[in-house]
Amino acid sequence: MFFKATAIILAGGKSSRMGRDKSLLSTNDIPLISKIAAQLEGHFSEIIISANDLEKYRFLHLPVIPDLEAGKGPLMGIYSALLRSRHEINFVVACDIPDLDMQYVRELLQEAKEHQIVVPVWSDGRLEPLFAVYKKSVAGHIKELLDADRRKIRLLFDSVDVKYVPLPDEGKWYRNLNTMEDYQNYIKQ
């Protein structure tokens, strides 16, 4: 299964809740970001890293796209990467989501043919905007929000066509490693 789309790994966060750089945490002796990139390889015609430290990720041999303006959060990272992407359809994944269900990613990408953004949703209504598909055509809407200093990703959903797709099996495979406790529990598995 090969997608004529771009995968964007967001790695520009401060990792404040973790206390250290999440993207470089070790999983089976490889950095977390390497594990994510390896799962995306062979599925996407382009993979890029959204991060401000160009040297840190040189070992991945992937393009690293810095934010056009530093300190503006993940919405700026998404915006900057969308502008550099070669494709209209872009799968965005945070660098702290170690396991990807590629069948589910395929479903998200399929839905993107008819919608501008496709976002996973939990049964309790929580959204996963950093494991979602964004069309390049939403960049203008993002710029308007950023220009108004409105940086919450969810604000974008009010002005574009969004499809919400339930996480299968209530996301048994889905992990988001925000804290050291999350990471240690993941490693124990």
Image (cartoon, rainbow, N blue to C red):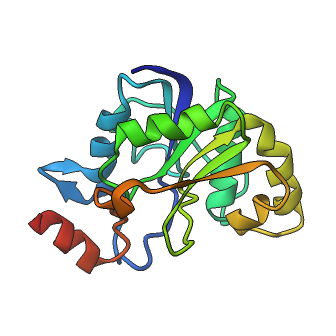
Residue at 72% x, 40% y is 115
Q: Percent position (x, y) of residue 188? A: 10, 68
Q: Percent position (x, y) of residue 168? A: 39, 54
Residue at 12% x, 51% y is 28
Q: Is residue 113 above or below residue 183?
A: above
Q: Percent position (x, y) of residue 68? A: 72, 49
Q: Is residue 8 visible?
A: yes
Q: Is residue 64 visible?
A: no
Report the side of 1 relative to 77 (left or right). Answer: left
Q: Is residue 102 above or below residue 53?
A: above
The quarter of the image holding the N terminus is top left
Nearest to the observer: residue 65 or residue 46: 46
Residue at 77% x, 66% y is 155
Q: Percent position (x, y) of residue 45? A: 49, 20
The quarter of the image holding the C terminus is bottom left
**Count of residue discs:** 0
Nearest to the observer: residue 151 or residue 56: 151
Quadrant of the image occupied by residue 89:
top right
Report the side of 1 relative to 130 (left or right). Answer: left
Q: Is residue 184 above or below residue 121?
A: below
Residue at 42% x, 42% y is 104
